[in-house]
Each structure stands twice: as C-alpha cells, then as structure tokens.
Amino acid sequence: MEFNEWVNKYVNDDETKELLAKWSDYIAENKGYEEGKAEGRKDEKIEIAKSMLEDNIPIETIAKFTKLSIEEIEQLKKEK
C-alpha cells in the first residue's frame, strides 16, 4: 500500500493528513539530496582514479583507495 493510500485509509482528520503529506514531501526531498551527494562522491572517486591511472598507479591500488571496482577502473583506463 502506498503512503498516500495508507493516510487516506487510516487517518481521518485533515490536519494530520496535511502534516503527514508535508512529512512525506520532506522525506522525498531529502532522498533526492542524499542521492545527489552520493553521485557527487562517485564522480570525485572517478576523477581521482583517472589521475592515479595517469600516474601509472596499479589498478589494485586505485581500487583499494577509491573503493571503485577493478572493472570500473579498467573501464576508465579503456576510455583514456
């Protein structure tokens, strides 16, 4: 059951419904914010890995310090 369906089924007063709707919107906004932060961290790791590849650092070492997979780093190496 979706959140809005649950609210409509189990909550009867309009004030509580409004507060729950605001809370739901707040959670959705924060989820997007957190996803954006994670994407930014991933982009930063990729840039670091690219720099390390340029310095001929072994792929295993890059994986260890960036927490990227060996496959991801090998793909970056191919894209150079």
Image (cartoon, grey):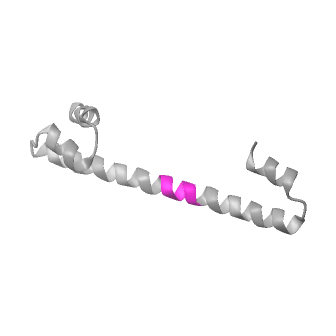
Question: What is the quadrant of residue 69 in the picture?
Answer: top left
Quick one: quadrant of the N terminus? top right
Residue at figure coordinates x 9%, y 41% from the top left: 56
Residue 15 location (% of width, % of height): 85, 69
State the residue lying farthest toward the left.
Answer: 56
| Of 17 and 55, the residue lying toward us | 17
Q: Is residue 30 above or below residue 47?
A: below
Residue at figure coordinates x 39%, y 54% from the top left: 40
| Of 38 and 53, the residue lying toward us | 38
State the residue lying farthest toward the front.
Answer: 10
Question: What is the quadrant of residue 32 in the picture?
Answer: bottom right
Residue at figure coordinates x 15%, y 43% from the top left: 61
Question: Which is the main secondary structure of the residues drawn in magenta?
Answer: helix
| Of 32 and 47, the residue lying toward us | 32
Quick one: quadrant of the C terminus? top left
Is 50 situated left or right of 23 in this image? Answer: left
Please count the marks in the image: 0
Residue 78 location (% of width, % of height): 22, 30
Is 56 situated left or right of 39 in this image? Answer: left
Residue at figure coordinates x 85%, y 58% from the top left: 11
Over which residues does the magenta segment extend? 30-35
Is 29 situated left or right of 59 in this image? Answer: right
Question: What is the quadrant of residue 72 in the picture?
Answer: top left
Magenta segment: does it hold 79?
Answer: no
